[in-house]
Amino acid sequence: MKSWQEELMHSAEGAHSQDALFERIEAGAQALGFDRCAYGLRVPVPVSNPRTVLLNNYPSEWRARYLAAGYVRTDPTVLHGRRTQAPLVWDAQVFEGAPALWEEARSFGLCFGWAKSNLDANGVGGMLTLARSSNALSQGELAANSLQMCWLAHMAHLSLSRLIVAGLADETPTLTEREIEVLKWTADGKTSGEIADILAVSDNTVNFHIKNAMAKLRTANKTAAAVRAALLGLFN
């Protein structure tokens, strides 16, 4: 009989469904003693309002309340995950700046939890949260299971981010080699005239490619276009 780790690795290799893959992550959470789990992914575009994707098996009423209250913007566990990839164990001190969130979460049975974030090279961040209604996490439990919990967080991000970002990639525009080239120089602070000299073309040619790139990237100016292209991984 396969272990939950083997089942998850097998599912991750050929998964095409976020829901099916998340079910395996749920199974891993349950094997580690948690009846609730959540995975959140943050894509760093658009810069002013990064896109967030949330998957969890929390009570539906709490999911609706969390979204309606905009708690993702003030959740101290989320803020922690953006600053560091160190694991976080829930306690009252963690939530002292968000007492309403802490009280409401506990009313829905989310009383004890653990969270860990991961960040990949393109700036896509993800965080896995494991939670339950009873039994605080002891030092003994953490010592025995922390490696497996961190592994589950890593696998959750590795597999789910691949599927989610692949879905978002359908919305990513295709730039020509020349459009990417002029945006790279723009990102380095070069003016259109300087780029024209570097590429041995006219200013009008450079501006033509920049305007096309701006239109494809739906940005208002060339600086924003360069930033968006970089965050979308188009310079890789």
Image (tube, rainbow, N blue to C red):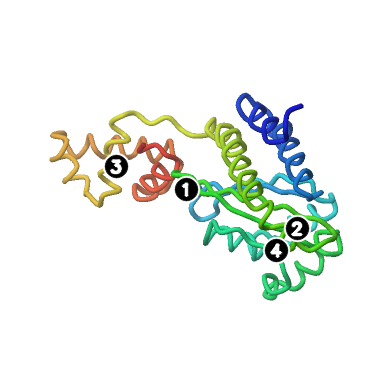
Residue for badge 4: 139
Q: Nearer the viewer, mark 1 or mark 2?
A: 1
Amino acid type for the residue under numbered disc 4: Gln
Label 3 to label 4: alpha-carbon separation: 49 Å
Amino acid type for the residue under numbered disc 2: Tyr
Disc assigned to residue 169: none
Residue for badge 3: 184
Residue for badge 2: 66
Above/below status of 9 relative to 116? above
Q: Quadrant of residue 165?
A: top right
Residue for badge 1: 123
Left or right placement of residue 144 versus residue 124 in this view: right
- Pick whichever of labels 3 and 1 is earlier in the sequence: 1
Q: Are marks 3 and 1 in contact (CB under 8 Å)?
A: no
Q: Residue 32: x and y, percent?
A: 75, 47
Q: Are marks 4 and 2 in contact (CB under 8 Å)?
A: no
Q: Nearer the viewer, mark 3 or mark 1?
A: 1
